[in-house]
Image (tube, rainbow, N blue to C red):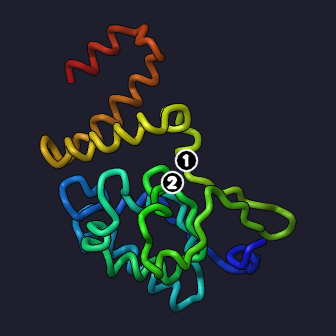
């Protein structure tokens, strides 16, 4: 195993889906310095005090809606604090582009992997991966899914800040209906909302 996985008795904190963006209306992590940023700073401080380490489990960065430099401008202090206590970064679909972004040294020092098998007490192992691997749209049509996220970011900036939530709820309802929308009454109900 790599050095990041050697310390079997180390306590770790798993964090996923921060979605740090550019600090604008499309930044789903909330305002710069807001509750999520403060919470991340508390976790980083706790890890510095206790020796615990963080394993990031995908979508820490919202690289489908913002570039790394804008994300750093909005959340640089929090990024430094979090990455200083992070052992492994399991990449998600929103931060999979991280390797191509020219990461700063403090982020490059963290091992980046698509998934992770973490030894547990006894002979047990914990399999860690980001959930996008099981999303049918993302796994079968990753470019279409990424384009959808980019469009949602544009719509958040220009139409309504929570339009991505509406899109997500509508998509979930359509998946319940079935691929070809056999339940037209249900579809009409969605359209009427």
Closer to the camera: disc 2 or disc 1?
Answer: 2
Quadrant of the image occupied by residue 180: top left
**Which residue lies under the disc numbered 1?**
131
* Quarter of the view holding residue 112: bottom right
* Residue located 20% across and 46% down the image: 156
| Furthest residue toward left | 158
Residue 167, image x and y in percent?
A: 30, 34
Residue annotated with mark 2? 92
Residue at 61 percent of width and 56 percent of height: 114
Between 52 and 146, the one nearer to me in the picture: 146
- Mark 2: few, some, or many residues within 10 Å (few <14, many ≥20)? many
- 160 shown above or below 192: below
Q: Is mark 2 in CB contact (under 8 Å) with mark 1? A: yes
Using the rendered image of the protein, determine whether residue 134 is visible from the camera's viewpoint: yes
Instruction: List x then y, in percent, for residue 30.
Output: 26, 61
Within 10 angstroms of label 1, few (less than 14), some, or many (20 or more) residues? some
Residue at 68%, 61% (x, y): give it.
116
Q: Work out whether residue 43 can be spotted.
A: no
Mark 2 vs mark 1, CA separation in Å = 8 Å
Local secondary structure at mark 1: helix
Residue closest to the far bottom: 49
Question: In percent of the image, x 15 and y 43: which residue is there?
Answer: 160
Residue 4 — which label? Answer: none
Q: Quadrant of the C terminus?
A: top left
């Amino acid at each position: 195993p790599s050095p990041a996985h050697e310390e079997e008795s180390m306590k770790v904190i798993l964090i996923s889906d921060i979605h740090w963006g550019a600090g604008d209306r499309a930044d789903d992590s909330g305002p710069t310095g807001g509750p999520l940023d403060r919470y991340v700073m508390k976790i980083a401080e706790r890890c510095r005090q206790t020796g615990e380490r963080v394993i990031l489990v995908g979508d820490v960065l919202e690289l489908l809606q913002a570039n790394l430099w804008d994300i750093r401008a909005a959340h640089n202090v929090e990024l430094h604090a979090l990455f200083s206590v992070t052992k492994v970064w399991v990449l998600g679909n929103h931060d999979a582009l991280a390797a191509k972004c020219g990461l700063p040294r403090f982020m490059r020092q963290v091992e980046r992997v698509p998934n992770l098998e973490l030894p547990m007490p006894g002979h047990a192992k914990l399999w860690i991966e980001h959930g996008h691997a099981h999303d049918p749209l993302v796994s079968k049509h990753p470019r279409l899914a990424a384009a959808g996220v980019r469009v949602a970011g544009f719509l958040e900036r220009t139409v309504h800040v929570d339009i991505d939530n509406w899109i997500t709820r509508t998509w979930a309802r359509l998946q319940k209906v079935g691929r070809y929308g056999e339940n037209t009454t249900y579809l009409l109900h969605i359209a009427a909302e």
